[in-house]
Image (spheres, helix red, strand yellow):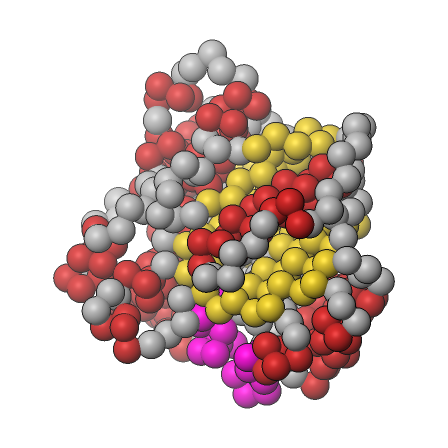
């Protein structure tokens, strides 16, 4: 069991905010209730919508090219939200296209998190701050920029806007895990292994418009009228889906409840890509319970090779394997021993039917300490295609045993690095 020491300042910061919890993972009343899966997802704040099977992007360079083309075709408005946003030489065509659209009169609204300027990936060596977009006619909102006021309210340092989504002209909607920065999209063949999904769905676009405007109005004095963005209300035939847009402070949407529902309802298989697998006891127990009732639980993950991150992830992986009994696929290196780009994938596929995509990692921070957006889709064809693409992106990898993980923990693991990863992400 994870009995860890939490530094006093961090504990006070967490207790000071109305964060959601991971209780749904072991909520026996909900697990044993007669509610359908759809009713449970809606009870946890999921908004039901109908979507098509999307276009899949598992290469940041390809997504960069197509995203730029989508921006160039915009006629009315572009709504764009990302966690880490910055420019670099390879991303300049995208931001040039965004600026050109703004100059042509297309309304462009961009939200980035305030930690973008503190990017700890390779982006920090090449990135250009996006503040210049304001001078070019782009409406830019920086969520909770880092400043001295955080000394008064340190909670704002912890709570971050991790969401990634895009809506163009009310017809095209994109959601996934890629940031708009060097390491996600602009590093050529060294981009992180990640995914984005593009839906030609007016109904999903309409819902995302509502959520984007809500996010913007919560963080900006420049109030947006949701009715100013044209929507298209058509009767769509497609897949049932549930959108979860969680604001840490409101507490009316539970990302934990979403994951818990799907895991606790799983009958045959769970394919999980958690990126940073720092989970608490309840999350681990839900996977262990699934394993014990005969569900095949696979976790595909790479460990961060950066100093403190490697120490933290080594500690986390050993605990995860020990506590869940899941089959852990280590995808950090190629079979030839070459270090591969970070496997930044955020995905869960249950019973080869339900798929979770979006910004949320399967870890404690995403469940409790960051604003997240995620989409659950009921589509065997989409789920299977994305699962296979994620495996292909991962490469062969190796299965890491509990003994090997414990050995790595003793060799590289560090409790304080683990705590930093656990709460800081």
Q: Measured along the vertical axis of the image, is residue 166 above or below residue 190?
A: above
Count of residue discs = 0
Left or right, residue 251 beside residue 358: left
Task: Spot the residue most to the left.
Answer: 8
Q: Quadrant of residue 316?
A: bottom left
Left or right, residue 1 beside residue 98: left
Residue 69 percent coordinates (x, y): 83, 66
| Of 115 and 230, the residue lying toward us | 230
Residue 342 percent coordinates (x, y): 58, 68
Residue drawn at (82%, 67%) of the image: 72
Residue drawn at (41%, 72%) of the image: 145
Residue 343 percent coordinates (x, y): 59, 62
Q: Is residue 139 visible?
A: yes
Q: Quadrant of the C terminus?
A: bottom left
Q: Is residue 260 visible?
A: no
The stretch of residues the image draws in magenta is 113-131
Residue 404 percent coordinates (x, y): 43, 58
Residue drawn at (76%, 68%) of the image: 105
Q: Measured along the vertical axis of the image, is residue 350 above or below residue 192?
A: above
| Of 73 and 198, the residue lying toward us | 73
Left or right, residue 297 beside residue 167: left
Q: Quadrant of the N terminus?
A: top left
Residue drawn at (79%, 28%) of the image: 235
**Residue 120: within the magenta?**
yes
**Residue 257: within the magenta?**
no
């Amino acid at each position: 069991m994870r009995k860890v020491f939490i530094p006093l300042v961090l504990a006070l910061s967490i207790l000071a905010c109305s964060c959601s919890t991971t209780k749904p993972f072991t909520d026996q009343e909900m697990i044993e209730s007669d509610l359908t899966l759809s009713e449970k997802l809606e009870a946890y704040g999921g908004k039901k919508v109908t979507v098509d099977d999307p276009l899949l992007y598992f290469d940041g360079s390809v997504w960069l090219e197509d995203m730029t083309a989508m921006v160039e075709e915009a006629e009315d408005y572009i709504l764009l939200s990302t966690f880490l946003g910055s420019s670099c030489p390879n991303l300049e065509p995208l931001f040039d296209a965004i600026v050109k659209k703004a100059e042509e009169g297309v309304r462009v609204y961009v939200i980035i998190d305030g930690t973008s300027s503190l990017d700890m990936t390779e982006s920090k060596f090449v990135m250009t701050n996006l503040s210049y977009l304001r001078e070019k006619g782009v409406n830019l909102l920086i969520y909770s920029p880092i400043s001295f006021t955080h000394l008064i309210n340190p909670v704002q340092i912890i709570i971050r806007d991790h969401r990634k989504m895009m809506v163009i002209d009310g017809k095209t909607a994109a959601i996934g895990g890629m940031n708009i920065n060097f390491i996600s999209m602009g590093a050529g063949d060294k981009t992180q292994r990640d995914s984005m999904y593009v839906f030609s769905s007016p109904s999903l676009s309409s819902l995302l418009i509502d959520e984007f405007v809500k996010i913007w109005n919560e963080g900006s004095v420049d109030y947006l009228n949701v009715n100013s963005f044209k929507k298209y209300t058509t009767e769509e035939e497609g897949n049932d889906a549930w959108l979860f847009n969680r604001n840490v402070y409101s507490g009316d949407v539970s990302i934990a409840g979403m994951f818990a529902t799907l895991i606790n309802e799983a009958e045959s298989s769970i394919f999980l890509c958690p990126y940073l697998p720092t989970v608490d006891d309840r999350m681990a127990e839900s996977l262990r319970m699934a394993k014990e009732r005969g569900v095949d639980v696979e976790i595909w993950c790479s460990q961060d090779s950066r100093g403190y991150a490697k120490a933290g992830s080594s500690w986390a992986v050993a605990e995860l394997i020990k506590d869940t009994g899941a089959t852990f696929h280590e995808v950090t290196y190629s079979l030839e021993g070459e270090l591969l780009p970070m496997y930044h994938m955020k995905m869960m596929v249950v019973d080869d039917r339900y798929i979770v995509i979006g910004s949320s990692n399967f870890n404690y921070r995403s469940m409790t300490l960051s604003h997240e957006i995620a989409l659950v889709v009921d589509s065997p064809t989409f789920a299977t295609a994305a699962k296979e693409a994620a495996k292909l992106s991962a490469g062969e990898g190796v299965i890491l045993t509990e003994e090997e993980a414990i050995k790595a923990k003793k060799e590289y693991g560090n409790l304080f690095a683990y705590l930093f990863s656990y709460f800081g992400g």
